[in-house]
Image (cartoon, rainbow, N blue to C red):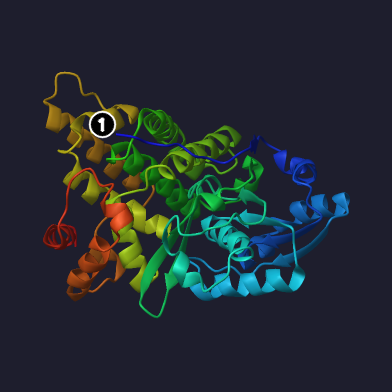
């Protein structure tokens, strides 16, 4: 199989690394920046240290802080309009995956004529966007390392993705201090999203030796640190390790895509608007159970990363210990993993299965071939 590996051009990391933002802007010869974030980030004061750095650089900047969770296409259009009105030569995205995704799509919309609809899919954006600096405030999506933007199409009640090499950031800046104030529930769901990214990329058909190396390290780091970060958000070592794990998983899955878990999460989230990290978390054990017979050796590695003893255990049983480990983790994070717990009507299952099977870029990377009927059975069994 012929494969290629692409990633962000520059990674700056460490506690206090936000202070390096001015130097990174100068490297990119930026003179006028649009900062993209969300109202929650603004309200909690996480924007303040970034603004202080920008003020010291005497850079002209404007703020668009209207990004919503699971942003709609209309948010991308509003950000684009704000950017056109201001005329930046640099885009800075600060926040979780939603803010960084809007920063990415805004960057390329400024240099590629609309409508946005023609860019949904794989590598359909013809021209590079404006230089982009991405700064995560959660250890979860890994969006700072990916070339993917996901938007909600509320008219059709689905989520759509734009994947383009032109959306890679010029700089990803990882300052763990920005994640310390993340509440336990958000720590849990975003951390699980990072784990799902690593696991789906690791077990997927597009996996390579490069992505396997990144993903297995990410899985090990999350296994060792997510409970610690959830229990005590001030644990600096756990916060830093979780941010690195999310980054590694993002670096990997941007080159492989995800799988059935994310296909289901997009289908359910598009219709019922549950938080993305929560969705990927509670779907995970169902999909693992379905997929493990396709690549049992990899699920054994996952089980071992979580401390399960697999020596002398028959292969499929040893692989199934990975599901046991994930259910134990979800229990400790207080995340229920039955669909009925989340007010999704049972009669919606056929429509959700149809939407999930339609997510071709994700389904094609799933290690086990899956049909619409099998997805219905999977959802029924875990309702």
| Quadrant in which residue 346 is drawn | bottom left
| Residue nearest the viewer, comparing 326 with 284 | 284
For disc 1, the neighbor class at 10 Å (few under 14, some 14 to 19, many from 20) is: many
Q: Which residue is mark 1?
A: 298
Q: Quadrant of the N terminus?
A: top left
User: Residue drawn at (64%, 56%), measured in percent from left and top?
Assistant: 93
Outermost residue to the bottom = 155
Q: x%, y% of residue 28?
A: 74, 45
Identity of the residue drawn at 78% across and 56% down: 51
Give the image location of residue 12, x and y in percent. 66, 37
Q: Is residue 29 found left or right of 133 in the rendered image? A: right
The reply to whether residue 335 is in sight is no
Name the secondary structure under disc 1.
Answer: helix
In the rendered view, would you say 379 is above or below 175?
below
State left or right for residue 383 relative to residue 186: left
Q: Residue at x 62, y 60 (%)?
A: 107
Quadrant for the C terminus, please: bottom left
Q: Quadrant of residue 336?
A: bottom left
Q: In the shown orientation, is residue 69 left or right of residue 13?
A: left
Q: Horizontal and vertical percent for residue 33? A: 75, 58
Q: Is residue 55 above or below residue 83?
A: above
């Amino acid at each position: 199989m012929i494969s290629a590996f692409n990633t962000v051009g520059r990674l700056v990391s460490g506690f206090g690394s936000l202070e390096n933002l001015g130097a990174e802007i100068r490297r990119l010869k930026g003179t006028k920046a649009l900062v993209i974030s969300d109202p929650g980030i603004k309200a909690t004061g996480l924007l303040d240290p970034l603004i202080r750095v920008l003020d010291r650089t005497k850079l002209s900047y404007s703020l668009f802080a209207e990004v919503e969770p699971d942003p709609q296409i209309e948010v991308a259009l509003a950000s684009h309009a704000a950017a056109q009105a201001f005329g930046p030569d640099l885009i800075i995205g600060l926040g979780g995956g939603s803010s960084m995704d809007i920063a990415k799509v805004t960057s390329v919309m400024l240099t590629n004529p609309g409508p946005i609809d023609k860019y949904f899919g794989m590598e359909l954006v013809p021209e590079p966007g404006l230089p982009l600096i991405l700064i995560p405030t959660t250890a979860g999506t890994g969006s700072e390392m990916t070339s993917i933007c996901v938007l909600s199409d509320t008219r059709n009640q689905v989520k759509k993705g734009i994947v383009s090499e032109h959306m890679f950031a010029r700089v990803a800046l990882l300052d763990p201090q920005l994640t310390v104030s993340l509440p336990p529930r958000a720590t849990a769901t975003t951390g699980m999203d990072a784990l799902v990214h690593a696991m789906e990329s690791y077990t997927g058909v597009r996996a390579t030796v490069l992505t396997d190396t990144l993903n297995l390290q990410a899985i090990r780091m999350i296994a060792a640190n997510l409970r610690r970060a959830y229990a005590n958000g001030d644990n600096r070592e756990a916060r830093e390790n979780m941010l690195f794990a999310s980054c590694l998983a993002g670096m990997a899955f941007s080159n492989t895509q995800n799988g059935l878990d994310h296909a289901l999460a997009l289908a359910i989230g598009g219709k019922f608007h549950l938080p993305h990290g929560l969705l990927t978390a509670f779907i995970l054990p169902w999909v693992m159970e379905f997929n493990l017979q396709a690549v049992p050796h990899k699920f054994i590695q996952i089980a071992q990363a979580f401390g399960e003893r697999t020596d002398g255990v028959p292969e499929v049983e040893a692989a199934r210990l990975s599901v046991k480990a994930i259910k134990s983790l979800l229990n400790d994070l207080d995340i229920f993993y039955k669909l009925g717990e989340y007010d999704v009507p049972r009669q919606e299952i056929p429509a959700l299965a149809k939407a999930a099977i339609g997510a071709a870029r994700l389904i094609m990377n799933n290690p086990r071939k899956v049909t619409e009927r099998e997805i219905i059975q999977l959802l029924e069994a875990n309702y």
